Image (spheres, helix red, strand yellow):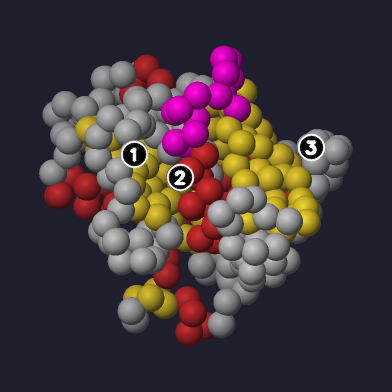
């Protein structure tokens, strides 16, 4: 028996999705993303000549600026920026336009859960990004970093991803993010609202590759013989959960990512100015 939800959704049901792109005149690319009452805007500027300090000039650099709905940018937002940067770097083709910087500005318009999703957060556990596999290490083979997070939102990946596409930034493939939460009774629920978040014991914020269509050669779409879509780009966990519960989150999240991937692709197709894609 699954836990009942206030808004009547099933445990695996996402809130209604809506996406618009090319909405800001002065940005090179822009997009808005809504999930229920949660809404985020993303704007892309660049590529601009030159890279930031300590960046590799032989590759393109991605800069992330995270703006909360209210207040100043603090340590928590810096954590968000770091994880979003690592995630976007893994899907962008950085060898094109070397020694340039592309800035991605994320503005939280309204947070009703699963917002900071690109990076959600508590004082806790584990973050892995930049590779593929179930539970894996980063590209250098070192243990994944473990920044501290505060419980607060979700994981914002679709808006920056859509804005990068709108700006013409070359990507290896699209990617989508899912927020899974674990109730006190150890039921897994997807895409929690802010009220639901307050009652959960643990969270898993997962980013999956969408590799059905890709600019990469066919052989590059596999990692150690496994199709790329079976992998995971980023995983942020918060709270305590068993391995079985985490694997359950992965299974449920991957299944839900199929619907979100299809919606993201559909929303990025040429559309009538001022129109927006929606999904119930």
Q: Looking at the rendering, in which quadrant would you find the N terminus?
A: top left
Q: Which residue is mark 2?
A: 83
Separation of disc 1 and disc 2 at Cα?
Answer: 9 Å
> Eyeballing the image, is 168 above or below 263?
below
Task: Write the residue at 58% across / 71% down.
Answer: 214
Name the N-terminal-most of marks 1 and 2. 2
Tell me which segment is drawn in magenta.
67-80
Q: Looking at the rendering, in which quadrant would you find the C terminus?
A: top right
Tell me where residue 208 appears, x and y as whole percent.
43, 56
Task: Write the residue at 34% across / 22% down.
Answer: 196
CB atoms at circles 1 and 2 under 8 Å apart?
yes
Question: Is 113 inside the magenta-drawn segment?
Answer: no
CB atoms at circles 2 and 3 under 8 Å apart?
no
Q: Which residue is mark 3?
A: 23
Separation of disc 1 and disc 3 at Cα?
Answer: 34 Å
Q: Which residue is mark 1?
A: 147
Q: Provide the secondary structure element on which disc 1 rests.
A: loop
Question: Is 71 inside the magenta-drawn segment?
Answer: yes
Q: How many marks?
A: 3
Tell me where residue 97 appears, x and y as whole percent.
73, 66
Q: Provide the secondary structure element on which disc 3 rests.
A: loop
């Amino acid at each position: 028996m699954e836990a009942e939800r206030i808004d009547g959704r099933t445990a695996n049901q996402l809130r209604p999705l809506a996406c618009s792109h090319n909405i800001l005149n002065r940005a090179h690319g822009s997009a808005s993303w809504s999930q229920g009452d949660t809404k985020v805007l993303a704007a892309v500027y660049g590529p601009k000549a030159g890279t930031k300090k300590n960046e590799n000039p032989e590759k393109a650099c991605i800069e992330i600026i995270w703006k909360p709905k209210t207040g100043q940018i603090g340590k928590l937002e810096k954590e968000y920026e770091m994880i979003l940067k690592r995630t976007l770097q893994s899907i962008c083709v950085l060898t094109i336009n070397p020694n340039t910087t592309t800035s991605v500005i994320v503005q939280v318009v309204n947070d009703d859960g699963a917002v900071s999703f690109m990076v959600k957060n508590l004082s806790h556990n584990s973050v892995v990004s930049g590779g593929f596999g179930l539970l894996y290490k980063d590209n250098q083979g070192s243990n994944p970093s473990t920044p501290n997070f505060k419980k607060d939102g979700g994981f914002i990946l679709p808006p920056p991803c859509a804005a990068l596409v709108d700006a013409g930034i070359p990507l290896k493939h699209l990617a989508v993010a899912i927020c899974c939460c674990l109730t006190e009774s150890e039921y897994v629920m997807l895409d929690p609202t802010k009220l639901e978040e307050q009652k959960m014991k643990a969270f898993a914020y997962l980013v999956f590759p969408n590799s059905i269509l890709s600019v990469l050669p066919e052989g590059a779409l596999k990692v150690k013989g496994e199709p790329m879509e079976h992998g995971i780009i980023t995983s942020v966990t918060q709270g305590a959960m068993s391995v079985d519960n985490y694997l359950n989150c992965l299974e449920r999240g991957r299944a839900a990512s199929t619907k979100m991937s299809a919606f993201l692709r559909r929303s990025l197709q040429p559309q009538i100015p001022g129109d927006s894609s929606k999904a119930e």
